[in-house]
Image (cartoon, rainbow, N blue to C red):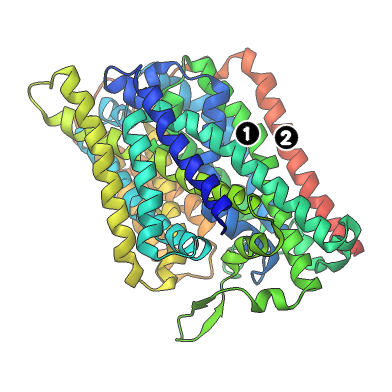
Amino acid sequence: MTQLDWLVVVAYLTGMILLAVAIARGQHDRRDYYLAGNRSGPVSIALSTMATQCSTNSILGAPAFVAFSVGGGLLWLQYELAVPLAMIVIMALILPTLRRLQLVSVYGFLEQRFGLATRLVLSVVFQLVRAFATGVTVYGIGLVLAICLETDFLTAVLLLAAVTIVYDAIGGLRAVIVSDVIQLAVLSAAILLAIWVAVSAIGGIDAVLTAVPAERLTGVDFSHTGWGDGHDYAFWPMLIGGLFLYVSYYGCDQSQTQRLLASRSIADGNRALLLNGLLRFPLVLSYCLLGVCLAAYATADPGFVERLPLRETGDGGSAPNYNLAVPQFIFEQFPPGLVGLVMVGLFAAAMSSLDSVLNALSATTMEDIVRRFRRKPLPQRSEFILAKLLTVFWGVLTMGMAFLVETIADSVLVAINMIGSLINGPLLAVFLLGLLTRSTRQFAVLTGLAAGFGLNLWLWVARPDISWLWWNVTGFVATAGIALLVAPLGRSPRLAAPTFDRSGLARTWWLAYLGLFAWAGVILGVSLGFTALATVL
């Protein structure tokens, strides 16, 4: 990177901190800090959620999957089929009740419905899993940034984490949302610019289609089920397993649901979900198309893969690090200044995936542990300061974990992407049992939760030929089934169940639901179109 590139990066990072300082002036208590004063509109919430989803792992990993991974290609688009369908379920069944209760931590609902133990178990599980996953994410991002910025791993991690922790701790959720919107704009511009440069370098769209291997354009795989055939990315596990995954992640995970709880009303929260269901696919399609361009570029220039930095393999050897294909292409094709812009895009993707998690970890610690077990409430000002300190604590802890996982094998770094699917299904089952049934009590749901999680662990160890996407379904079915079976045997006290809010089922929302369902059809049509193109080529 040239001095001009570094100037662009430093200016961007400085701007993020100054923005947080300006936003912090309007905050007075912990609800301002964690819920942005319930003043966030649906557009900003939707864009912030999209930015969090579009992490550095996505920007680097998805193009690498499309361009180079064995069995990869545009099959990744099948994953997006489930997103608009998941938004329908959350809008109709989950968000209205949770938003009406005016929660800060989504796990507070579980105490009202089942009891304190259920709330603590799922909150602590969230904190442990998210903290470890975030540490691994920081580790992966730090390695990439160290190579791209030509610096050491410590400096890269400190630069990324320090800026993120500072503006997150100062500005709270409002700073997270506003910065995420800016970061999404920068990131989108960087992706589109990279696609334009790649197409120009290869010689036009026709040259790209001629050079790219046809199998990389295949967007749908109906020939496998993912159930015992060793194919993780077949159509059915990505559609059905993805549906359960996204309903759980967007509707029951604090790092995502917290922004919906920060909406001005139930209707605004549903509008944010509607926008996310409609706008996420174009973003994912853009970085998958960048992967198509990289596949064509590598075919036209066979030495490109040889110039990629190497990574160590599990057998003690080395192989090209395909996750660095995007930065390598940028360094080869972009002029000074624009390289800095794309590096800002990488920082934006990294920070947008970290800031919301740190704020959510702070919120669950404050609400589910500190405030829940403190006999005498803290003064408002003290709570506000403690909220900021908890954000710093989690930021430092996850940054420290990044150095610990440096000694972990690469296989664990791959496996971390599957950890969420171990718990997503059981978590969703507990929430839906609380929302839709009255007979299940705390003993039953905790027994079901243990059974669902245990079954998924067994599948991971004993049946690696079953796609991990199916774990989202098996965990849900096992948890719900065991909980309903055990319900008559439990001795847990009967609590007053929160009344299910039916506003999401009102006729005024059915047009939106039909639109989301139709949009899923459009996504399938695009995937089938690429598959047909692959057949022609």
Say what amino acid the circle numbered 2 marks: Trp
Report whether 225 appears left or right of 92: right
Q: In this view of the protein, which residue sits in the foreground, 184 or 145? A: 145
Q: Which residue is mark 2?
A: 519
- Answer above or below: position of 296 versus 509: below
Say what amino acid the circle numbered 1 marks: Gly
Residue drawn at (80%, 69%), measured in percent from left and top? 213
Residue drawn at (41%, 50%), measured in percent from left and top? 160
Task: Assign the C terminus to one quadrant of the image.
Answer: bottom right
Q: In this view of the protein, which residue sits in the foreground, 404 or 502? A: 404
- Answer above or below: position of 455 versus 168: below
Tell me residue 343's x, y (percent): 56, 52
Q: Earlier in the sequence, mark 1 or mark 2?
A: 1
Tell me residue 423's x, y (percent): 39, 50
- The residue positioned farthest toward the left in the image shown: 375
- The residue positioned farthest toward the bottom in the image shown: 316
Q: Which residue is mark 1?
A: 277
Query: What is the quadrant of residue 111 in the picture?
Result: top left
Tell me residue 141's x, y (percent): 46, 57
The reply to whether dot 1 and dot 2 touch (C-beta < 8 Å) is: yes
